[in-house]
Amino acid sequence: MQTLIVGDVHGCARELSDLLNKAHFSPSRDRLLLTGDAFARGPDPLGVWHLIEECGADMVLGNHDARLLQQLDALSTNRDPGRVKPDQSFTLHALEPVHSTLLAWLHRVPLYIEEDRFLLVHAGINPERGLADTRFEEFITIRTWPPAKGRIDGPRWHDAYRPVHPLLIFGHDAPGGLVTKRRDGKPYLLGLDTGCVYGRALTGYLLEEERLISTASQQDPEAWKARGR
C-alpha cells in the first residue's frame, strides 16, 4: 500500500486523474488524502467528487470547503446562503446532482488528520500554541505570522514553527508555492499547494517513498474568475 497526499485540487479533475496515474494509484490497494479546497474555482468540481468517491479519499477541511458546506447547509433547508460569488455559483451549480451526498460527506471532514507518521492540515497550525490550541480559523486560513488578515506576503507561520510532529503537511498557500523543510535529511514540513487552478501544477507526496510528484496544470490562470458570470 502507498499513501498519496495531494495539494489543493480546486476543481482540477483532469490534473488529479493525471497525478493518480503517475503514482500508479490503485483504489483497491492505496490511500488518497487531500489537503482541502477540493472543488472551488476549477472547471470540474463534479469530476473531482467522482474521483474522491472512486478512490475512497479522505480530506481535511479547507476554507473554500467550509464556505461550500455553509452554502449547502443553507440551500438544503431553504435558507438564504448569503452572498454567492460567481465562481462559487459555478461550483454549486456543477455539484447540484450530488448536493445531498456531498453535504453529508463534508460534515464528516475533519480539520486535521493526525497519525504516527504525519499531521495533515489545510492551512497550518498556530506555531506558538500548537495543534491542541489552534483555532478553527487558523486551521483553514493561517498564512502569515504574525497573522495579517488578507495579506499574502510576509513571513509564514511555518517560519516560526519548531518541529513537533514527525511530518506536518499543509496546503492553502498557493502564493508561497511548494515548501520543503528538512531535518537530518528527512522532511519535517511540506507545503503542497502549487496553484494548479492558477496555471502552475498539482503536487502530491508519496509518503512511504518520501517522494514528491507533480503534473503540469492545464488551466488558464484567469479562467476561474469568469466562471459563473
Image (tube, rainbow, N blue to C red):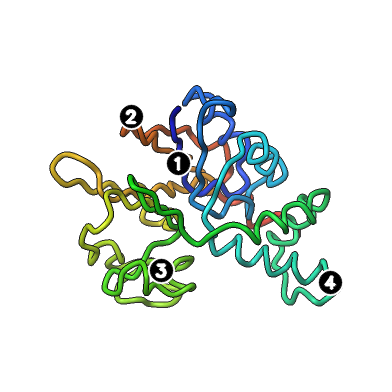
Q: Nearer the viewer, mark 3 or mark 1?
A: 1
| Marks 1/2: CA–CA distance | 12 Å
Secondary structure at numbered mark 3: loop
Give whichever of discs 3 and 2 has the lower sequence position: 3
Give whichever of discs 1 and 2 has the lower sequence position: 1
Numbered badge on residue 5: 1
Q: Nearer the viewer, residue 7 or 208?
A: 208
The amino acid marked with disc number 1 is Ile
Secondary structure at numbered mark 1: strand
Q: Give how far across and how far down residue 183 sits, in percent.
A: 16, 47
185 in relation to 82, above or below: above
| Marks 2/4: CA–CA distance | 45 Å
Q: Give how far across and how far down residue 94 sits, in percent.
A: 77, 50
Q: Which residue bears the numbered disc 4?
A: 77
The amino acid marked with disc number 4 is Thr
* Residue positioned 65% across, 37% down in the render: 51
Q: Is residue 115 left or right of residue 51?
A: left
| Mark 1 vs 4: CB contact within 8 A | no
Q: Is residue 183 left or right of residue 190?
A: left
Give whichever of discs 2 and 4 has the lower sequence position: 4
* Residue positioned 25% across, 49% down in the render: 188
25 in relation to 179, above or below: above
Secondary structure at numbered mark 2: loop
* Residue positioned 48% across, 34% down in the render: 216
Q: Which residue bears the numbered disc 2?
A: 209
